[in-house]
Amino acid sequence: MTVMRSPLGRARGLGSAKSGLASFLALRITAIALVPLLLWFVTAVIRLSGADHDGLRNFLGEPGNAAAFVLLILAAFHHAQLGIQEVIVDYVHGKAAQTALLLGVRFLAALMAVFLVLSVIKLGFGV
């Protein structure tokens, strides 16, 4: 006996339709967060054009500017890491290579973000 099933019925149980939702939302949220942060960054760069090292230290010594710069760094590296992760998952088919690349991307993004955040703290607050 043949059972008539809809396309949805045939697709059920063949994989999760919601596995990419968290990544999709994280990419969109970081993209939205980056818009005002990048606008702030562009205006800060324009304002600081021609400034010397002490001018940059004074600028980053203000807690609001340091916080905005740290937020920009964290959002940008998280957004980049998520985007590269999507490319790896979509185009690298070997499980071992995919795992190694995903770990490498996460490690490098975290390493660079930590380095830049510590640089902002050292420059701004002389720690």
Image (tube, rainbow, N blue to C red):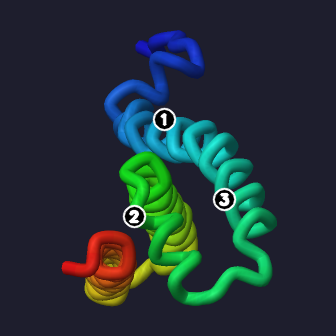
For label 1, the residue is 25
Give the image quarter of residue 49: bottom right
Q: Quadrant of the C terminus?
A: bottom left
Residue 14, can we see it? no
Within 10 Å of disc 1 (Cα), the crowding (few <14, some 14-19, many 20+) is few
For label 3, the residue is 41
Q: Quadrant of the N terminus?
A: top left
Between residue 102 and residue 36, name the one nearer to us. Answer: 36
Between residue 102 and residue 108, name the one nearer to us. Answer: 108
Looking at the rendered structure, the secondary structure element under dot 1 is: helix
Spatial separation of the CA atoms under disc 1 and disc 2: 33 Å
User: Of the residues shown, which amino acid type is indicated by label 2?
Assistant: Gly
Within 10 Å of disc 3 (Cα), the crowding (few <14, some 14-19, many 20+) is some
Foreground tag (3 vs 1): 3
Left or right? Give the position of 63 relative to 83.
Answer: left
Spatial separation of the CA atoms under disc 3 and disc 1: 24 Å
Spatial separation of the CA atoms under disc 3 and disc 2: 15 Å
Give the image quarter of residue 98: bottom left
For label 2, the residue is 61
Instruction: Give the residue at the far left of this rendering.
Output: 127
Res. 108 mark:
none
